[in-house]
Image (cartoon, rainbow, N blue to C red):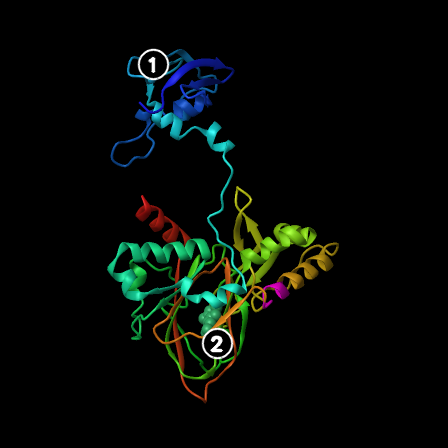
């Protein structure tokens, strides 16, 4: 047995476990009862045991390390004995887990990535033909937040097979794929020939799409060059150098609104420009000059909120951070929509044709598939 228990003692509402290698763990009574190996259905793996059926005063009547090396507990209620495998206890020990230093999966980047675009490029067929290729794409998306798939087909809707190597796409009212072309009376500035400042898509959703894929079919017009920026890197710069501004961006919800005149729905959402995870890592960025609504935060903070938004927005277009490139037919510009902001320069629709098709996918699909394939 790799993880042998040498001693167990009672300590208030938990058991203290000493391991053969000197490590110590604390296991709460209710936590132990709730995680009894018999608590779950074998097939669905759902918990069938209901902790609400025992009282808060639940405690072990008897506990010992049995001849199999398992922790055996006879409970004070419910006429039940639990047997815990020491390897399972060690693997799920929250005492040890809480002592570990958090390591971010994110590799923040700045404009120096521009000279190394091959680092974030991957061939379409490599993804189609091998799990190694798929893993490489998913790791780029998860760690750097950006990847450019090269040499994809250029027929309409032809990005589906490679996207479905990951999972299903996320539907929106723009339809899948959405057509990024210059149209009369555009319901979205993306469907014009105007420049688009660095932005995320759909910040006015409660849960904006986690990832976006822009598949370039034709790019013959003058202009229409792409830009991208790692807004986590910009947020990190502010966290380290301009703490007051960072604090405002994390704590004050901004208002975003869908302004699409074709919609028979009024969608809006409040969220701070930067949100953090339970570990203090970066979670989401919400930034879009085009769809930020008329702010209505308290008069005492409006000035500081606008100045923080102004500073953040300037850094989000700073050449020290952003990269610029031109999409070629057969490229799929893939990125974390809640981390990497994207933009384009104005193009001249009379000089040639430009057509991208866009797809969205939830973040769960990217991370879930990567975790599955890495196991
Ligand atoms: C979009 C968008 C960029 C481009 O459709 O959301 O930002 O290069 N398009 O046209
Ligand atoms: Zn966009």
Q: Which residues are magenta?
A: 313-319
Which residue is label 2 attached to? 225
* Residue 79 in the image, given as x and y percentages of width and height: 34, 14
* Residue 7 in the image, given as x and y percentages of width and height: 42, 14
Element class at badge 2: loop
Circle 1 residues within 10 Å: few <14, some 14–19, many ≥20: few
Q: Is residue 226 above or below residue 170?
A: below
| Distance between mark 1 and mark 2 Cα atoms | 70 Å
Q: Which quarter of the image is occupied by the N terminus?
A: top left
Can you see residue 272? no
Element class at badge 1: loop
Look at the image and say whether residue 314 sits in the magenta stretch: yes
Q: Which quarter of the image is occupied by the C terminus?
A: top left
Which residue is label 1 attached to? 79
* Residue 347 in the image, given as x and y percentages of width and height: 49, 82
Relative depth, front residue between 192 and 103: 103
Q: Which mark is residue 262?
A: none
Tell me what residue is drawn at x 31 percent, y 48 percent.
373
**Which mark is first along the chain, 2 or 1?**
1
Tell me what residue is drawn at x 64 percent, y 51 percent.
240
Look at the image and say whether residue 213 sits in the magenta stretch: no
Q: Nearer the viewer, mark 1 or mark 2?
A: 2
Can you see residue 75? yes
Mark 1 C-beta to ligand 2 under 8 Å: no
In the shown orientation, is residue 267 left or right of residue 358?
right
In the picture as drawn, the residue positioned furthest to the bottom comes out as 350
* Residue 248 in the image, given as x and y percentages of width and height: 66, 52
Q: Is residue 314 above or below residue 6?
A: below
Tell me what residue is drawn at x 31 percent, y 57 percent.
134
In the shown orientation, is residue 198 left or right of residue 307?
left
């Amino acid at each position: 047995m790799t993880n042998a228990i040498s001693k167990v003692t009672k300590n208030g509402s938990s058991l203290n476990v000493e391991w053969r290698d000197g490590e110590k763990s604390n296991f709460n009574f209710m936590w132990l009862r709730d995680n009894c190996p018999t608590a779950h259905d074998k097939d669905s793996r759902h918990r069938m045991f209901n902790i609400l059926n025992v009282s808060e005063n639940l405690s072990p009547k008897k506990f010992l390390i049995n001849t199999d090396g398992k922790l055996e507990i006879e409970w004070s209620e419910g006429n039940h004995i639990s047997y815990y495998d020491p390897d399972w206890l060690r693997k799920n020990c929250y005492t040890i887990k809480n002592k570990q230093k958090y390591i971010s999966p994110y590799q923040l980047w700045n404009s120096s990535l521009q000279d190394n675009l091959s680092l974030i490029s991957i061939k379409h067929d490599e993804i189609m033909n091998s799990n190694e290729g798929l893993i490489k794409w998913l790791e780029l998306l998860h760690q750097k937040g950006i990847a450019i798939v090269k040499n994809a087909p250029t027929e309409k809707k032809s990005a589906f097979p490679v996207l479905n190597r990951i999972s299903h796409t996320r539907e929106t009212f723009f339809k899948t794929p959405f057509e990024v072309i210059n149209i009369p009376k555009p319901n979205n500035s993306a469907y014009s020939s105007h420049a688009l400042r660095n932005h995320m898509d759909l910040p006015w959703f409660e849960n904006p799409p986690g990832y976006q894929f822009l598949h370039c079919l034709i790019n013959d017009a003058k202009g229409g060059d792409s830009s991208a920026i790692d807004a986590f890197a910009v947020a990190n710069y502010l966290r380290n150098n301009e703490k007051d501004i960072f604090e405002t961006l994390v704590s004050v919800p901004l208002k975003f609104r869908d302004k699409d005149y074709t919609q028979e729905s009024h969608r809006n959402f409040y969220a701070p420009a930067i949100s953090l995870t339970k570990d203090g890592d970066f979670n989401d960025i919400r930034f879009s000059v085009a769809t930020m609504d008329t702010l209505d935060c308290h008069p005492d903070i409006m000035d500081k909120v606008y100045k923080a938004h102004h500073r953040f927005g300037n850094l989000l277009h700073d050449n020290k951070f952003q990269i610029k490139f031109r999409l070629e037919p057969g490229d799929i510009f893939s990125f974390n929509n809640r981390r990497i902001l994207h933009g384009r320069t104005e193009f001249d629709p009379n000089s040639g044709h430009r057509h991208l098709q866009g797809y969205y996918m939830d973040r769960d699909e990217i991370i879930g598939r990567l975790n599955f394939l890495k196991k």
